[in-house]
Every structure is written in C-alpha cells, then in structure tokens.
Image (cartoon, helix red, strand yellow):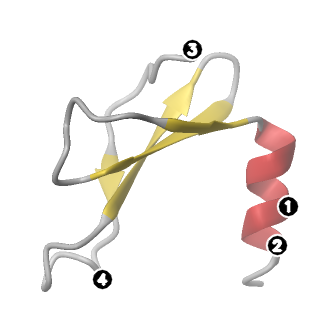
Amino acid sequence: MTDAVGPFQKSSYSAQLGDCLEVADTAPVGRAVRDSKQDNGPLLTFSRETWMDFLRQFS
C-alpha cells in the first residue's frame, strides 16, 4: 500500500454539501484519494501518469 505523504486537500466546491473527496501526494509523486467522511478509510492511489491522464479529461 502507498501512504499519503502530504496533507489531504479538499475542493472548495465540495464544502457546501459535505460529500467530497480529498487528494494528497504520495511518494514518489503519485496521488491518494479518500472519502472526506472516512479519515481512516481506504485510499485509492494513482501513479503520476494515471493522475495526469485523469486530469486531461477535464481540460
């Protein structure tokens, strides 16, 4: 399992409803995603390449 090495960040758009995902950095340069309501819940982890492919879908 890959651990998050940075603080989790929440989107400013998700604060209104409280249903959100949080994203943090992983070593080396990947991303971890979690449900904001489950601090100790499971993490979905992605390599840098996979995360960048995901983000390109929205640009």
Instruction: Residue type at mark 3: give it.
Output: Met
Gap in angstroms between the C-alphas marked 2 and 4: 19 Å
Q: Are marks 2 and 1 in contact (CB under 8 Å)?
A: yes
Q: Position of residue 13 (x, y in %)?
A: 30, 82
Q: Which residue is mark 4?
A: 13
Pointer 2 or 4: first along the chain: 4
Q: Give the label on residue 1, or none.
A: 3
Distance from label 2 to label 3 (Cα)? 26 Å
Q: Judging from the image, what secondary structure is the residue with disc 4 in?
A: loop
User: Which residue position holds label 2?
Assistant: 56
Q: Earlier in the sequence, mark 2 or mark 3?
A: 3
**How far is mark 3 from mark 4, CA to CA?**
29 Å
**Label 2 residue SS:** helix
Mark 2 or mark 3, which is nearer to you? 3
Tell me which residue sits at (62%, 17%) in the image: 27
Q: CA distance from mark 1 to mark 3?
A: 21 Å
Task: Identify the secondary structure beneath mark 3.
Answer: loop
